[in-house]
Image (cartoon, rainbow, N blue to C red):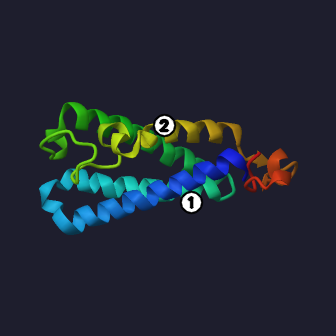
């Protein structure tokens, strides 16, 4: 994996840690204040963790897992972003505050994280579209593609 792919994985890893830490604190410290929002924080952490692993791991199965998790992430950002902006009560929130202790990574389209959660899945999808796994000539197994000489993930061209 080179260049943009590495940066993508690092950013996903950082968001995974940030979302996991935030959700753990929210659930331990004051879960009853907004259980729906805090459960969504934990879910987003899980999505980021699985997406990070899927972007690193070689093969068709992990490629599909990456597409699935990144699609869920984009849907989550759009749905939770819209709800938190226009109907915060649906998430158990009193007001819209992307930097508040009750917000999630996806609140207000990721405004509390400089909108990275909104842009990242689009970049991830573009990267995945350019780095599809390649079938071997006769075995049907994934083989390294043209970028393998540059250290790209095994099974992705």
Give the CA separation, mark 1 to mark 2: 19 Å
Which quarter shows the C terminus? top right
Q: Is residue 145 visible?
A: no
Q: Is 82 placed above or below 100 here?
A: above
**10 Å crowding of disc 2: few (<14), some (14-19), many (20+):** some
Count the marks: how many?
Answer: 2
Left or right for 30, reference 149: left
Residue 71 x, y percent position in the rendering: 48, 41
Residue 51 x, y percent position in the rendering: 52, 53
Answer with the quarter of the image where residue 43 lies.
Answer: bottom left
Residue 90 x, y percent position in the rendering: 17, 40
Q: Nearer the viewer, residue 25 or 67?
A: 25
The residue lying at 29 percent from left, 52 percent from top is 40
**10 Å crowding of disc 1: few (<14), some (14-19), many (20+):** some
The residue lying at 56 percent from left, 59 percent from top is 53
Closer to the observer: label 1 or label 2? 2
Which mark, residue 115? none
The residue lying at 55 percent from left, 44 percent from top is 67
In terms of secondary structure, where does tag 2 sit?
A: helix
Left or right for 144, reference 118: right
Q: Is 46 placed above or below 4 here?
A: below
- The mark nearer the N terminus, 1 or 2, is 1
In terms of secondary structure, where does tag 1 sit?
A: helix
Q: Which residue is mark 1?
A: 53
Which mark, residue 119? 2
Q: Is residue 24 visible?
A: yes
Q: Is 24 placed above or below 127 here?
A: below
Answer with the quarter of the image where residue 98 lies.
Answer: top left
Q: Nearer the viewer, residue 87 or 11?
A: 11
Residue 61 x, y percent position in the rendering: 62, 54
């Amino acid at each position: 994996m080179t260049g943009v792919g590495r940066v993508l994985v690092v950013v996903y890893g950082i968001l995974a840690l940030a979302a996991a830490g935030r959700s753990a604190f929210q659930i331990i410290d004051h879960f009853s204040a907004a259980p729906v929002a805090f459960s969504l924080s934990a879910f987003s952490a899980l999505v980021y963790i699985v997406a990070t692993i899927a972007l690193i791991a070689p093969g068709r199965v992990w490629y599909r897992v990456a597409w699935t998790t990144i699609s869920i992430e984009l849907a989550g950002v759009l749905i939770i972003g819209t709800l938190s902006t226009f109907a915060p009560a649906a998430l158990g929130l009193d007001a819209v505050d992307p930097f508040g202790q009750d917000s999630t990574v996806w609140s207000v389209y990721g405004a509390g994280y400089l909108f990275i959660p909104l842009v990242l899945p689009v970049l991830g999808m573009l990267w995945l579209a350019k780095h599809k796994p390649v079938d071997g000539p006769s075995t049907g197994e994934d083989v390294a593609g043209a970028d393998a000489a540059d250290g790209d993930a095994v099974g992705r061209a």
